[in-house]
């Protein structure tokens, strides 16, 4: 069978946060009322942790005969079994009811554990090439399945990943979200910077960009008297609720603070720990490297995980967390971002 290429294909199969826990749980429960909505939270947790697109794991769970009994996938009354390493289950704290060591099969009573185990199985990157095409992985996972299997997986991924929504609120920076900004312009741009639409915030600072094709977007908020705020929506959930902050030019140009220089901008954001313990009093150091000049900038996140790089020249940067903050992988975490306009660029991290 020819490799599948859909309207937005190839999907990023390593986008572990493509769907949120409630979105996953709602879909699971709609397929089988025996599955609690809360199972989606556990699946989202491990997909995000291990960089496995949950839509792909869901599609396999529904199509694969080893999830549930008698070849009916997730439609059965229990989560069935999954081929997985016992040591890996123990390491990640995933429960199971029994294990067949000779065949590396674990059986599950809890739906959330069963779906989490599928994410862990797919996260074996030496066995499954998640940077490759969907069908190539399915041939490895399911042993040359029939065409209906391919079609079913691809159709469900199309359904789950086809569209997104984007809405949010614009706040004035430094007001602890007490001051909202009405009549601000919200520009939606494609990844290449071409303008797609412009709307204004309402009296409560809110905006709604409606339903969009899943893709990479740039969202820019602007209003007279404020610096432009730029948000790169490059790994969207299905429903994206954004908080944008506009910095007053009067405040930012205060000589006691940090004036914005011509041709420069700010890179700011938050380091969110959604899998492991909150930041507490720990320090997380970040560095930003200009990929053209190799100029290095550094800053420290505060106790809430918020950080800012002041006055960096426009260009392409690699923003990296210097602390070893991902114990499962053991690697530093980084993102490549582009500061294309004078203003503020938002870049959040999720560990």
Image (tube, rainbow, N blue to C red):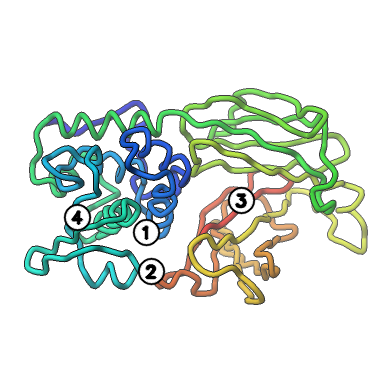
Q: Is residue 116 left or right of residue 317?
A: left
Q: Please name which of the two marks, 1 or 4, marks the residue nearer to the observer.
A: 4
Depth order, front residue of 25/254: 25
Residue 228: image location, x then y, percent? 76, 41
Secondary structure beneath dot 4 equals: strand
Eye-nearest disc, 3 or 1: 1
Q: Where is mark 2, residue-wise?
A: 329
Where is residue 78 shown, x and y percent of the image? Answer: 24, 48
The first of marks 3 and 1 along the sequence is 1
> Cβ–Cβ below 8 Å for labels 4 and 3?
no
Q: CA distance from mark 3 to mark 1?
A: 30 Å
Question: At x 82% / y 40%, what residue is drawn?
Answer: 180
The residue nearer to you, when weighing 111 against 156, is: 111
**What is the CA distance from the residue labelled 1 to the residue labelled 4?**
17 Å
Q: Which residue is mark 1?
A: 50
- Observer-side mark, 2 or 3, equals 2
Q: Is residue 280 above or below residue 131?
A: below
Q: Residues within 10 Å of mark 4 (few under 14, many from 20)?
A: many
Please give the residue where the numbered disc 3 appears in the rendered image: 315
- At 61% from the left and 39% from the top, the residue drawn is 241
Mark 1 neighbour class, 10 Å CA radius: few under 14, some 14 to 19, many 20 or more: many
Mark 3 crowdedness (10 Å alpha carbons): few <14, some 14-19, many ≥20: some
- Residue pointed to by mark 4: 82
Q: Is residue 222 above or below residue 251?
A: above
């Amino acid at each position: 069978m020819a490799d599948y290429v859909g309207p937005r294909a190839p999907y990023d199969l390593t986008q572990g946060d493509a769907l949120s826990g409630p979105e996953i749980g709602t879909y699971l429960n709609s397929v089988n009322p025996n599955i609690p909505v809360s199972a989606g939270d556990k699946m989202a947790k491990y997909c995000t942790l291990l960089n496995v697109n949950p839509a792909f794991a869901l599609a396999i769970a529904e199509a694969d005969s080893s999830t549930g009994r008698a070849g009916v996938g997730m439609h059965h009354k229990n989560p069935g079994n999954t081929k997985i390493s016992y040591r890996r289950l123990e390491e990640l704290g995933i429960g199971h009811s029994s294990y067949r060591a000779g065949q590396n099969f674990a059986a599950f009573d809890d739906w959330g554990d069963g779906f989490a185990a599928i994410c862990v199985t797919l996260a074996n990157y030496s066995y499954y090439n998640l940077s490759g095409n969907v069908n190539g992985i399915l041939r490895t996972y399911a042993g040359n399945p029939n065409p209906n299997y391919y079609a079913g997986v691809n159709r469900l991924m199309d359904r789950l990943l086809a569209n997104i929504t984007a809405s949010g609120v614009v706040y004035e920076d430094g007001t602890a979200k007490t001051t909202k900004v009405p009549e601000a312009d919200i520009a939606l741009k494609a990844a290449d910077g071409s303008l797609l639409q412009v709307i204004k915030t309402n009296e409560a600072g809110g905006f709604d960009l409606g339903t969009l094709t899943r893709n990479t977007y740039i969202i820019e908020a602007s209003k007279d008297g404020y610096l432009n705020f730029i948000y790169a929506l490059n790994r969207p959930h299905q429903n994206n609720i954004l908080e944008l902050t506009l910095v007053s030019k009067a405040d930012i140009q205060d000589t006691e603070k940090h004036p914005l220089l011509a041709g420069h901008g700010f890179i700011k954001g938050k380091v969110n720990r959604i899998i492991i313990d909150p930041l507490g009093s720990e320090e997380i150091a970040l560095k930003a490297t200009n990929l053209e000049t190799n100029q290095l900038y550094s800053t420290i996140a505060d106790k809430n995980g918020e950080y800012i790089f002041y006055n960096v020249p426009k260009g392409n940067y690699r923003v990296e967390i210097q602390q070893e903050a991902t114990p499962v992988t053991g690697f530093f975490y980084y993102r490549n971002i582009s500061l294309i306009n004078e203003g503020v660029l938002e870049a959040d991290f999720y560990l």
